[in-house]
Image (cartoon, helix red, strand yellow):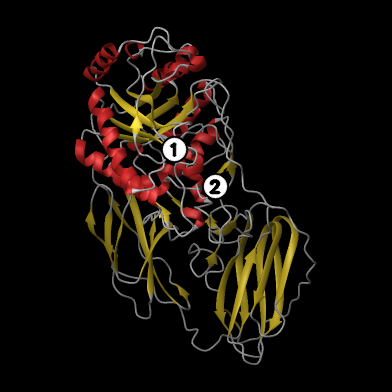
Amino acid sequence: MDRARRPRSVLAALTATLLAVPALTALSSPAGAADADLAVNGSFESGLTGWTCTAGTTVDSPVHGGRSALRATPAGNDNAQCAQTVTVQPDAQYTLSGYVRGSYVYLGANGTGTSDVSTWTQSAPDWQKLSTTFRTGPTTTKVTIYTHGWYGTGAYQADDLTLVGPGGSGTGQPPAAPAGLRTTSVTSSSVGLSWSAVTGATSYALYRDGTRVQNVTGTSATVSGLAASTAYSFQVTAANAAGESPRSTAVTATTGAGTGGGPSDLPAHALVGYLHAGFANGAGYTRLADVPDSWDVIDLAFGEPTSATSGDIRFNRCSSGGECPGAESDADFKAAIKAKQAAGKKVLISIGGQNGQVQLTTTAARDAFVSSVSKIIDTWGLDGLDVDFEGHSLSLNADDTDFKHPTTPVVVNLISALKTLKAKYGTKFVLTMAPETFFVQNGYQFYGTGKWGGQDPRCGAYLPVIHALREDLTLLHVQDYNSGPIMGLDNQYHSMGGADFHIAMTDMLLTGFPVAGDPDNVFPPLRPDQVAIGMPASTNAGNGYVSPAEVTKTLDCLTKKTDCGSYTTHGTWPALRGLMTWSINWDRFSSWQFQKTFDGYFG
């Protein structure tokens, strides 16, 4: 969150230079009578099963055939390759074909034992067929086929990829679809499932509402991270070296009502705002007692560390003798806190902000954080904590690649500290978070330094914290401002300044998404009552301001699925908790426009 009028700089986007490539010649030849298509899931109807992709996902539009196609986006030093290794016969002829869209899209084969081949198109605005042939060497039994784009050229699509020729020994057939799928347990956030074993299967894939979410080797699994009081459809497939079976008959389950995530006495739709308690800047100082009753959660900005790695947090109020003329006394401030709480409002200490870098690099810093934050909460009689870590507070070590099992000290220690505070203060403790999009939604494309290094280690670094605390988290309100373009679940980049950005970013939180494009590593959705949308109160407050009309359009789309524009959401969430803004002071400076928009919509 910004203290100054001038917005902070946006995190630099990853870029790459398009290199010149030599022309390649496409070949073709008819398949023999005994030939077969050896490519597994070349139509991508079963997600990315059978393929190993550095980046990519399946989409339902555009497609060449069936209901799915591959879409992948090169970035940095990654050309977004998807590949699979196929069993072939030595000294045999093969034809590799497929349909592609986009610029500089390649299709090829490596490890042929003779001359490796590839074909490509410079520009395919609509589906274009690529085809090439090769002959295997006298001892070749495995060939890798692949498709990829080119560095920095944007997304490409591929569909209906085939490798036609004689099958190698042991290729066999995919197993049959599993039978007997049933639910074994249902909670507010998980569903247990089991099914009958399939002869010849070596693994099974679970699908939730048509999206593959988990791979297992046994005949049971639990799908977690689900929203409370929500109906889900599940299917399962069986797989072996020859491919994946058709999907089973679907079963449906409705999760129970949720009880976690902080106090249940928040209103169904809440307005959250930051109050400049330690400074004024151009918005001027606002006394806590003068904050209108419309504000349900008031975050006191900010608690800051004595040094970046100390973990020792201090809350210093702005005094009337400094930049905050008219500031109330400590006694009056405490009285205003009690009055707000008596009216059903929550008053929190917000830790961090633009200038408050907090890096809990050691367990000593973790313990100091718990002790000092507890002292602030107890001294002022607050309801809880808002985590507003920005800048370089959170980043991931190069070997920290799984958001479900983080190993980086600053992440692990923060999770531990927050769990300790939650345990200390109990179920009424309010825990909120206000990360930037770079640390959350950007994780759909990039996580940490990436498989080959070179990425910003802060990419997606908030995801392990959110995931570990999701049962304790009251609200997540990502800052949909001061942000660069972010790719949404439609695999299009979305930029600030309109409803489209807020819709796409919020849809990601409520739908879940594969981290770094890995369909086997999905960040589960949050409950809608845990999500508020972060917006700047005015043009003075930060980049990304949207008009009241665009705020209303955003809420209509997400809660009613009307007026959605070009973006198609993956659900409708009437229980969306509400809105957050930076800041209450800037909204007062703008005649309470943001507050009035909220009140006018939710009543």
Marks 1 and 2 close (CB-CB < 8 Å): no
What residue is shown with label 1?
435
Q: Position of residue 371 (x, y in %)?
A: 26, 36
Q: Residue furthest bottom?
A: 138
Query: Left or right of 190: which side holds 434?
Result: right
Please indicate, yes or no, whether residue 397 appears anywhere in the rendered image: yes
- Location of the C terminus by quadrant is top left
Answer with the quarter of the image where residue 25 lies.
bottom right
Q: Residue at x 39, y 18 (%)?
A: 599
Cα gap from disc 1 to disc 2, whole angstroms = 22 Å
Q: Residues within 10 Å of mark 1 (few under 14, many from 20)?
A: many
Where disc 1 sits, the SS reads loop
Where disc 2 sits, the SS reads loop
Q: Residue furthest top?
A: 326
Q: Label 2 amino acid?
A: Asp
Could you say which is closer to the camera, residue 501 or residue 464?
464
Res 490 label: 2
Q: Residue at x 48, y 67 (%)?
A: 49
Please indicate, yes or no, whether residue 227 appears anywhere in the rendered image: no
Q: Position of residue 432 (x, y in %)?
A: 34, 35
Could you say which is closer to the camera, residue 500 or residue 536?
536
Q: Position of residue 463 (x, y in %)?
A: 41, 47
